[in-house]
Amino acid sequence: MNLLHTVVFVLATSLIIQDVKSDCSLETSSPRPLLVTTFGSKHFSSSAPENIMNSDGEAFRLHCPKGFMWKSPYNGYREDERYFGNTNLDLRCESGNWYWPDDQIFVGVTVKCACSHSSAIFESRTSLPDCENYMTLILGHQLNETGSLKTMAMCYDPLGLQLKYVSYLAYPMKIRMLEEVLLQRQGGDLNLLGLDIGVDYTKSFFKQLSTVNVSEVLRKDTQLAELLSADTFEYASLIQDKIFANELVGYEDMFNIVWLRALRKGIWMHWLNDLRIASTGENARKFNVRLGVSGVATVPLMDKCNYTRPLSIETSDGNTLSVPAQIWAHVRTLPPDHGRNDTKSSKEFVIVAHNSPFFKAEDLNSFCTSMCNEIPWLRNSFVGRLQQYPIYGLMQCCPIEDVANKLDNLPKPAARGGTTIATTAPEPNRLLSFSFSLDENELEDEYLENIGPERPRLFDI
């Protein structure tokens, strides 16, 4: 019996070892690739997790806009880093190792996107509302024959190096079936925008700022130090939704602003959480969200009557950062068809958050009559109960007509029904040294008649 037990134990151990060896493990690091998997005729996309585990024979695709970097153990004591230039990396698991055509990645490899970006920037020939005089840029993925994905759109002024506003859908699924997205389209502003022209993220046309230590600057400003504590403000992204964190890696400088800390960590986080709840669950709705900033906050000076100074921060590299007076979010509820048949009857309002510690709660009504209590998913939330307590930041919900002429860069109500009429972007300006590369995407039906058809693509999301 002892011999039999020994044989059974050895066989069982052998089978376990063989089973373990048949699995493959792949580590990813930031910026993480896009993961595309296939199930029959369907394709699914998501951000790659920290650890990808696949069984023997399984396969998938990784996508990075500028290729891949990976590290693998070398001679057992150091790491060998290599570059793979293709935008797509097709991997399959065989006997514990990863393979792609004509080569092999050994066990223990770590993969990330090259060039510090997990998404690419494109220009759309169709303009966002009130953005005809600027550039409409999109963060997204061009997946060649598999399709394309659009994460968010930006109205950007390349001469002033200024972001006018951002537009995105709240919220895309973490795992998206490309064929299903094709049928439903992406809602709101993203519907008519195309990944038409590739844009390189260069220092010449995107303001590059070093990490700003706002606390240190406030300590050195003697006038501000008398009025504010060093941790009153912080330098952080305008986009606080964690679901977009991986897509924004490498582009932080485009979105960073000076926040009132209590506002960012207080009522702003609460309304975003309420938005997430409203966009999930049984009665979930989708929302088109536009974000921007307006004005410059001011500081009252005690030694001069009725005198104020703009609130700005001088950085160590010679740049000046103005503190926005307001941070706004235009929220529009999309119809059940996700905006394909968008109308002006869509429910909409503007969140206005006051980004100055000197703005008083009694001044809220003079800015607009707040309608937070008229919005079902905000009425009984923290936002509804805390909107007039300065310790959490002061915020209100405004009818768009009340603030259309008060907020910088907010698209006017006439353009609220969705993307404005299509406009054809000019050819790349060689004198400005933009690094553009035309892709082969089909343009939207709305302007095919004007510029002629191109070779159709499989998916246009």
Image (spheres, grey):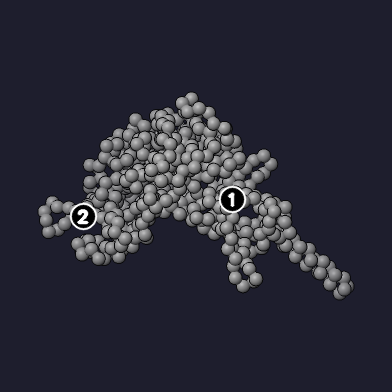
What residue appears at the point 54 percent right and 47 percent down from the top-left corner? Answer: 174
Is 447 above or below relative to 25?
Answer: above
Q: Residue furthest front?
A: 431
Mark carried by residue 86: 1
Nearest the eye: 380 or 15: 15
**Is residue 449 shown left or right of residue 26?**
left
The quadrant of the picture occupied by the N terminus is bottom right
Q: Position of residue 282 (x, y in %)?
A: 53, 40
Residue beneath the point at 62% across and 49% down: 61
Q: Is residue 169 left or right of residue 355?
A: right
Image coords of residue 209 (percent x, y) = 36, 56
| Distance from Cα at disc 1 to Cα at disc 2 | 52 Å
Using the rendered image of the protein, determine whether residue 369 is visible from the camera's viewpoint.
no
Name the front one of labels 1 and 2.
1
Which quarter of the picture shows residue 423? top left
Label 1 Cα neighbours within 10 Å, binned few <14 / some 14-19 / many ≥20: few
Q: Is residue 343 left or right of residue 118?
A: left
Q: Say which residue label 2 marks.
A: 299
Out of 30 and 208, give the one closest to the viewer. Answer: 208
The x, y position of residue 220, in whole percent, is: 25, 65
* Position in image of residue 80 (x %, y %): 60, 65
Residue 315 appears left or right of 249? left
Quadrant in the rendering for residue 260: bottom left
Quick one: SS at disc 2?
strand
Give the amino acid type for the residue marked by disc 1 in the picture.
Asn
- For the point 33% across and 32% down, the residue is 413
Amino acid marked by disc 2: Val
Vertical placement of 82 versus 177: above or below? below
Residue 234 image-quadrant placement:
bottom left
The residue located at (38%, 48%) in the rendering is 205
Dot 1 falls on a residue whose secondary structure is: loop
